[in-house]
Every structure is written in structure tokens, then in C-alpha cells.
Image (cartoon, rainbow, N blue to C red):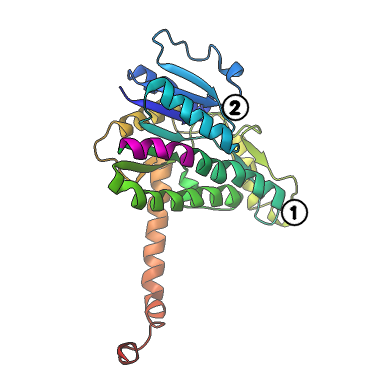
Amino acid sequence: MTVWFITGASRGLGLELVRAALAHGDRVVAAVRDPRAFTGTVPDASGNLLVLPLDVTDEEQARAAAARAAEHFGRIDVLVNNAGYGVVGAVEETSDDEVRALFETNVFGLLKVTRAVLPVLRAQRAGHVINIGSVGGFAQGAGSGIYGASKFALEGITEALHAEVAALGIKVTVVEPGQIRTDFFDPSSLRPAAHTIDDYERTAGARRTDFARTNHRQPGDPVKAAQAVVALAHTAEPPLRLPLGSDSVARIEAKLAHVTGELAAWRHVALSTDHDTAEARA
């Protein structure tokens, strides 16, 4: 029976992951900031659910939660780093304090939890780390560059971790959802930069308006997304990246085409900066 450790499990995709994993017959550690708010959200008569307090920015709490999970269920098979939030605003509009706070949760929080759980996976010589990223960590546009930067960081961390732990029997995947119909576009999860600049009204400003207009109308189904992640965890050879949603696939394909075309156009310049062959031999 697979044991999950899911952060940010109180709502949105995290909550749907808890439900989907339990429905699959697995055991779940739901790590949430306030367990009292989670009580009764997911009825569990089987004893397969353990709810633990976890602020991902608290390293000691992360270690304690990982230890308690391993003690309670005997192992951890799947770590899902799902906790996080967004900031919307132009790069110039977003203050250092807003950027640091975002990275503290989305990047440093993920690292704290991963460092807490990896010793369990290494001892088992088995496990799967699933980082919930975003298509915004692969392709970005106006208005969400700072949030995207945190997800770009997650992509790099995932790639490196994959290279580091594959020989230890541990799998690593970054999931890249498009827009999923959760409350992520609510102000509690997608926070506007406190400062705005009129010159960005048609770019970052338009993105803020678009988020508000599409809130709770996003094309992605969170139940189907959660089921896809559960299936991913039970796959023998999971991919390094898993896009979710037609909008995610379209944005990834568009960026790959753009990068391919730009590389072709500027290839001669890129290759011109190597040492000459004779000089390199000397």
C-alpha cells in the first residue's frame, strides 16, 4: 500500500490529491498549516489518513512531520510538494519583500520538506518525489514573472534532483498544470503586488484582469488532475515532466517552436564564440 506525504493538502489540488489517493486504497499524510480547519474535510473510516501540522517554511516542523509520518505508516513512498501561492504584477511593480515571501514558501519551503523526507526515501532505496510546478515554470508572459521565477527554480531543482537520486532508486517528476478550476485565482492564493505602475496597464494590468475574469472558469478539472498524479505515482517509469491540461500542452509546444526557430536564426552567432580549432588544440 503506497504511503503519500502531501503538502498544502487543505484545499485545491492538494485536497483532491488526498481524496484521489485514498480512493485508490493508499495511505495519506495530509500536511496542512492548521489541522483543525481540515477536520471532517475528508472522512476516513479506514485509518489510512494522518493529518499533521506543517508550515513548509519551518524546517524543524518539516523534520518532525516527516519523522511522524514514517513512524506512523512505516514508510513514505510519494512526496508531493504542493504547497505554494502566486503573486501577480509586473517585475518592476513587485517589491523585494513580496518576492522574498513568495520564494520562502514556493522554493525554500519545498527544499525544507524535500530535505526532511529524502533520508527516509534514501534508506528505503525507493520512493517518488513529485513537485507540483506550473506551465508558468516553462513559459512565461507579462504579469506573473515573479511567480514564474519560483516555478522555473522548481524546474531546475527537479532536474538536478532527478540526476542525483535516480541511482538510489528514487524517482522525481515535476508536474506542469495549466489553469485548474480551484480557488488559486482568489486573493488568498494569488496575491496582487501592492504597487502598480500605469505604464504596465496593458501588459501586467491586463493579466490581472484576465485572472479575475477566468477565476473559477479555468479549463482544467482538479479531480481529473489529481487522478492523473495518482496514476503517475503508480507508473513504473514516470516521466521527468508531466504537463496537465490542453492549455499547458499548447504553451509548451509554442515555446519549443519559438526556441527552435530562434536557435536556428542565431545558430551562426552562438557557434562563432568557440575557440578556433587550431587554438583549441594548442
What is the three-letter code of the residue carrying label 2? Arg
Please state the total of marks drawn on the protein image.
2
Tell me if I can see residue 128 in this picture.
no
* Magenta-drawn segment: 114-124
Rendered image: mark on residue 245: none
Up-down: is 198 above or below 266?
A: above
- Name the residue: 52% across, 26% down: 31
Q: CA distance from mark 2 to mark 1?
A: 37 Å
Which image quarter is the C terminus in? bottom left
Q: Earlier in the sequence, mark 2 or mark 1?
A: 2
Q: Which residue is mark 2?
A: 33
Up-down: is 11 above or below 84?
A: above
Q: Position of residue 245 (x, y in %)?
A: 40, 38
Q: Which residue is mark 1?
A: 198
Based on the displayed image, in which of its 4 quarters is residue 3 positioned?
A: top left
Q: Is residue 234 left or right of residue 257?
A: left
Q: Position of residue 40 (x, y in %)?
A: 53, 11
In the image, residue 123 lies in the stretch drawn in magenta: yes
